[in-house]
Structures are given as C-alpha cells and as structure tokens.
Amino acid sequence: MSLRASLRTVLGQENVNFLLTNRIPRHALTRFMGWFSKIELPPVRAASIAAWKLFCDVDMADAKPAKYRSLHAAFIRELREGARQVDPDPAVIAAPCDAIVGAFGRIADGMALQIKGFPYPIADLLGSEAEAHAFRDGWFVTMRLTAGMYHRFHAPHDLTVEQVRYISGDTWNVNPIALKRIERLFCKNERAPITVRLDADGSRMVLVPVAAVLVASIRLPWFDAERNLRAGGERAAPCTARFAKGEEMGWFEHGSTIVAIAPPDYRPVAELHEGRRIRMGEALMRMG
C-alpha cells in the first residue's frame, strides 16, 4: 500500500479524523495556516504544495497555467477560460461553486438539516429572525468544498447584493464526520450571509459562506477591497453590488461550505442528490 493510501486509511477512521481536525486549538491553527500558506520561499512553497497534494484530491487540470508563488496562491487558483459552462436557461439557478452536495430539501417551519437527525434554525444561521421568516417554508442546499477543490464562488443568477452580514464564530471542521457529532455546527462557525435579489423575478435568495478549520478568511473583494471581511467586526451592511450569472463573487482560502437558501416556489433540480459532485455553473434549482 502506498504512503498516500496508508495515510488516507488512517485519516478515514472517524475517531482519528475528528480528533485531528477538531480537538485541536482551532483558531490558533487557522491563524497559523493563514500566515504559513502565504510564505513564498521556494523550499517552503514546494514542500507545502506537495503535502497538500498528498493529503487531498487536487486536480489542477482546469486551472489557469501558473507557477504559484505560495500554497495560498494555489488554494485560490483561478480557472482557465472555458473550464466551466454556466447553464444558460434563465429559469435555472446555477451552482455557485464546485462542491459535494450535502443535505438539501424543504425548510420545515424554519428548520433545515445539516445531516439527517440534526436540524438547525435558519434564523441562527442567518443571524436574523426577521430575514429568516421569508424562507421558513423555502428550500436549502448545502454544498461542501473540499480542500483540493476550486475555492472561488460565483453568482447563481443575474443579481444585486442587498446586504452582507458578518457573524464571527468558531472554526469546526465541516466534513460529514463533524456534522454527525456537533449539533448546529453551521450556526457555530464564522459565516457571512449574503442576501441577493434576482433580476429575473425579483425573488430573494441568501448564500451563506461558512468558514471552517484552516480557513484563513472568506474574501469578498467587492465588499472590503483592502482587508478581510472579518476586519470590520460583526455587522450587517447594505450593498448594491451587481453580478451577472456565473460572475465571480469571492473565495475561501481553504475548503469549506456554502448553504443556499431559496424561496418556497423554487425547486432543487431532479438530478440533485446527497453525495453528488457538482461543478460551478451546473443546474442547482429551478425558479417557480
């Protein structure tokens, strides 16, 4: 058995995985990773990128050709032209990111599922009872970005951002092992609910990027051009930024999760299922 296969066998054991990714000083390790990943010294860069590729399924075939200056630069790589096709159907809400689909379905009286048997109030996720009320019988889709995936996220339709809310929090791992053990995990972690209004029918959606262990930051360059989102502290800020369907909105500086919250008259596409790998631009939902 190869070294890579042996490591994955060990790390695939639930107790070991949970211990190594959660029973650690999460904030300190995340801050360290944010600093370490930006080191541009060639030996550090080469060793860290090699370790990343050893532990994670990393496919750089669809990235813009580049010699990455650091591990951080490789994490937030851009796609080459034409690497993703955005569904052109005006009734389709496109996937905002490459991801593995987690729990999804109806929001039942204001409650969504992080995994079967683990409900959470979307009001806690969004940080507002009033904003959650409009979606109390809507839909949710959880999309998990693994550490080796493309880390940028894009507009699911032509839209205007109406508000960005920053909520500070923990950095629990968001993999299925942690989701089965930590109740209301998404409501505990740092996150940035982005409320948008779609041009097509005037409906509102919310995209909720959720940070996780080793995620140095969620970046929204159109919102805080000169600093990380967290630098301004907890706040809800109005916004008027406009994006075309498929246009880049921001990125994670490691793997994490986006939860999409949609109104009651939308529907997930029939081919959506838990565990499916979805690529940015593919059909995620249909408008009512």
Image (cartoon, rainbow, N blue to C red):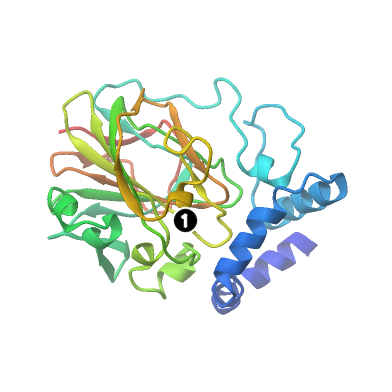
Q: Quadrant of the N terminus?
A: bottom right
* Image side of residue 147 versus residue 135, left or right: right
Residue at image coords 61%, 73%: 20
Circle 1 sits in a helix, a strand or a loop, which is it?
loop
Query: Residue at (28%, 29%) from the top-left corner?
Result: 160
Q: Nearer the viewer, residue 285 or 205?
A: 205
Residue 65 in percent (x, y) is at 71, 27
Return the x and y of residue 34 as percentages of the image width and height. Answer: 63, 54
Amino acid on which disc 1 is placed: Ala
Q: Give the vertical position of 140 relative to 61 (above or below).
A: below
Instruction: Give the residue at x 31% y 28%.
Output: 157
**Which residue was labeled with disc 1?**
211
Q: Quadrant of the C terminus?
A: top left
Residue 2 position by quadrant: bottom right
Q: Nearer the viewer, residue 285 or 220?
A: 220
Q: Judge left or right: residue 108 versus residue 45.
A: left
Q: Residue at x 64, y 69 (%)?
A: 11
- Residue 266 higher or lower than 8, as above or below: above
Observer-nearest of 223 and 250: 223
Q: How many marks?
A: 1
Q: Residues within 10 Å of mark 1 (few under 14, many from 20)?
A: many
